[in-house]
Amino acid sequence: MPNIPMRDLRREYEYMKDDIDAAIAKCLQHQRWILGPEVEELESAVAQYLGVQHCVGVSSGTDALVLSLRALAIKTKGQEYFDQHDTIITTPFTFTATGEAILRARATPVFVDIDPRTYNIDPLKIKDYLESDQAQSAVGILPVHLFGQACDMDAIMKLAEEYNLFVVEDVAQALGGKWKEKKLGAFGHAAAFSFFPSKNLGAMGDAGLVATHDNELAELVRVLLNHGGKDKYNAQHLGYNARLDTIQAAVLTAKLHYIDELNERRRKIADYYNEQFARNPNVSIPTTAAPAFHVYHQYSIIIRKGNRKEIKDHLRSASVGTAVYYPTPLHQMGVFCGRFVSGESLQHSEQVANSIISLPIEPLLPQNSIDFVVATTRSAFN
Ligand SMILES: *Cc1c(COP(=O)(O)O)cnc(C)c1O
């Protein structure tokens, strides 16, 4: 029986082995481990790929979010952190780090509901909130392109302009994704990318990156990631050690050459799953809202009939990996208790969290494995 994990990093490494080994060998030769030349190489390569002015490598996707927000507090308020009454609008249906970053920048998250078809923040709900009385304190919007699918960036940027808000995109799951012809991460004032090993472009450890068109924000992020000073021994701001490792940058630049090919493979697998599950009354397939170019970091379906745990167990007993992203929306987590505002009902986020399941979409899986996932998923409902 085949073993089909959610992600197969060994398979990916074997596929790119020569490129990755050569990139690492080069680092072993020069031994410039801290902000070595590979960091700048990755930054220019990603900037060119995205069509943005600046990219700044950092130590993780979470740090990319925190540093973007800190840089915005310094730029827009002239202070190190936001004030607690400054609110940032985001989705509760995301990974913890999105909301955590807002708290760590000392602002308050406002959770508004998702569109249950795309799983992404609903721009109409953002609008409702901004038109309400409590909205004067809003300073920004933090949309998450969840599972690799673009948020409606036309609507979000329009609202941001109208209400004078900044936009920080969380692109941790969507490198290579697009809205119309523009790459995600090129819309907001800043954008945060993660290269956590399981992401579409994964490092061999933790890594992340901030993209921005804004010279001042890029400079501030550069300063913050290296202890808060242009001069290391004379700090201006309360900084971090949040540098991107040289060796991770080398691996990432080598792997970046494959990103479009691998995203295309993910899209093909998703199309096939969609075909196979479209008329299955037990599940709802993910909706792709054109003109979003979806890069399927996850392929997630809604279970309409049946018990999620039993379906998961059935697939596990056939050695098919599944995962629940995410079982608990942020507004129900202890860490956010008493520290967020909610626009209104968050029922779609709660319903989706209770019924969603992700199937393997490892881009290098052979067709017979994909067929096996389809057959096993079907039989799980019998
Ligand atoms: C992975 C992820 C992050 C955090 O990235 P790390 O590199 O793990 O710190 C943030 N937001 C979302 C939506 C993510 O999926």
Image (cartoon, rainbow, N blue to C red):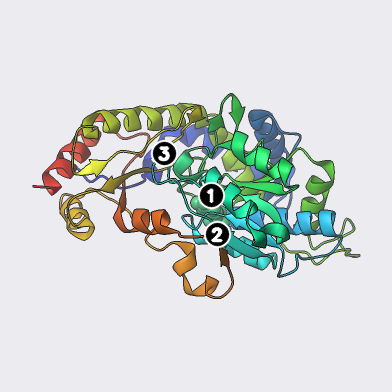
Residue depicted at x 15% and y 41%: 378
Q: Secondary structure at mark 1?
A: helix
Quadrant position of residue 26: top right
In the rendered image, the residue lying farthest to the left is 382
Q: Give the mark nearest the N terminus, 1 or 2.
A: 1
Q: Residues within 10 Å of mark 1 (few under 14, many from 20)?
A: some
Q: Is residue 243 visible?
A: no
Kindly identify which numbered label has been placed on residue 343. Answer: 2
Q: Residues within 10 Å of mark 3 (few under 14, many from 20)?
A: some
| Alpha-carbon span between mark 2 and mark 3 | 42 Å
- Tell me the amino acid under the disc marked 3: Glu
Q: Secondary structure at mark 3?
A: helix
Q: Quadrant of the N terminus?
A: top left
Kindly identify which numbered label has been placed on residue 125. Answer: 1
- Per the image, the residue denoted by label 3 is 12
In the image shown, does 297 or 78 lie closer to the viewer?
78
Q: Secondary structure at mark 2?
A: loop
- Tell me the amino acid under the disc marked 2: Gly
Question: On screen, 184 above or below 222?
Answer: above
In the rendered image, the residue lying farthest to the top is 181
Q: Position of residue 264 (x, y in %)?
A: 43, 27
